[in-house]
Structures are given as structure tokens and as C-alpha cells.
Image (spheres, rainbow, N blue to C red):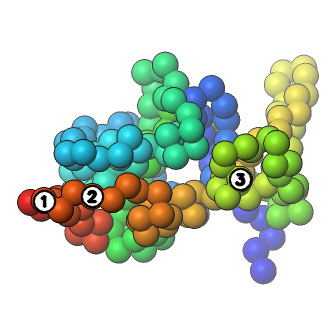
Amino acid sequence: MQDHLTLVEILLGKDHYLIDGDMVDRFVRPLTTISVYDAPPYIEGMAKWGEGMIPVINIAPLLGMDRADTKKHRTLIIHKGAVSETEMAVSVDDVFNVRTVLPSDIMPADISACEGMEEYVKGLIRLKIKTDETEEDLLLLYLNLYKMLTDLLRGKIARPAPDFYIWRWDTGIVTS
């Protein structure tokens, strides 16, 4: 049994959140995307990665948020096989820390604290942040990135695509 979890602290909108770090291969600067016709707002487009193209997902609209007004956006590359047969990219407003926490540190989330995104919250985690002379308590939502991305891929979130094009997640190709 795993004695600790590795979590990544990210910024979405104005708030900090935690996501599972074991899904993330690396953090990179924002990828240049090619728009996909009539894509929902959480699909930023397709980006060249290695020898192929991968989808770039912005999870903020899935949670009912707008992007932060920052020039420091980051992209998380999700491991091949973690969610789909190919790598994926998730766009966030910033990445702050990689943290380790004990599973016992995860508290149940109060429904009022996560209205509209209940199914994507694993719990709350209280972190103690030490600065030079002070210690501050932070309470962060622990998001279920895996569920967000699998629901998206299964079409539970996506609106129906028009008949004249098909979004091909397995190969990362848009065909007409």
C-alpha cells in the first residue's frame, strides 16, 4: 500500500487546487495549438508533441471557471496510457509545487465548497505553508483529474459533434 500521495498544486482562475501527480509526465510552457472547428470551450486545440499531434484540454471551463489573467500559463503532459492510448496535454494557469501528503490527510469535501463540480472533487487537504517567520494553513480542493478527462473522452461532457467531422482521440487526428 502506498504510504503517501504525490500531488501537484495548480492554479485555475484565482484559486489553487491539487491534482494527482502520478498522471503527469512533465510540465512545459504552453504549446502552440491548432484550433479544432466547433470544439467546446475546454478544447484549446491540437498541438504537435513528438512525432504526432495531441489534444490540449483546458479544465477550467469544465469546472465553470474562466482563465486567470496571467501570462504564465503552463501545460501538463499526461502520460500515455494514464487516460488514453496517447499522451494528452492539460492547460492550467500555473503550476506551483509538487507535494507529498498522506491519504489520511484527505478530508471529505463539504458540498457547498464545491458546488457545480462535486463529481470532480476527491476531497479537501489542509496544508501548512512555512515562510520565513510565519506558518499559514491552506485548505485546497483535491480534484479528480482522471475522472474529468475520462468523462470528457467518453463524451459525457462533450456536446455532440456535427456529422461532417469526427474528433479522433485515439490518434489525435481531426478528419473531415
Furthest toward the left, the residue is 176
Q: Which mark is residue 118?
A: 3
Which residue is drawn at the image coordinates 46% and 26% (left, top)?
72
Q: In this view of the protein, can residue 23 be seen by the observer?
A: no
Q: How many marks?
A: 3
Give how far across and how far down residue 78 sits, in percent: 44, 59
Q: Amino acid at mark 3?
A: Glu
56 left or right of 47 in image: right
- The mark nearer the N terminus, 3 or 1, is 3
Give how far across and how far down residue 159 sits, in percent: 38, 55
Which residue is drawn at the image coordinates 25% and 49% (left, top)?
46
Give how far across and how far down residue 52 sits, in percent: 19, 60
87 left or right of 112 in image: left
Quadrant housing residue 174: bottom left
Q: Which mark is residue 164?
A: 1
Q: Secondary structure at mark 1?
A: loop
Give how far across and how far down residue 145 sits, in percent: 57, 57
Q: Secondary structure at mark 2?
A: loop
Gap between marks 2 and 1 measured at Cα: 8 Å
Q: Secondary structure at mark 3?
A: helix
For mark 2, what is the residue? 161
Q: Is residue 93 above or below residue 111?
A: above
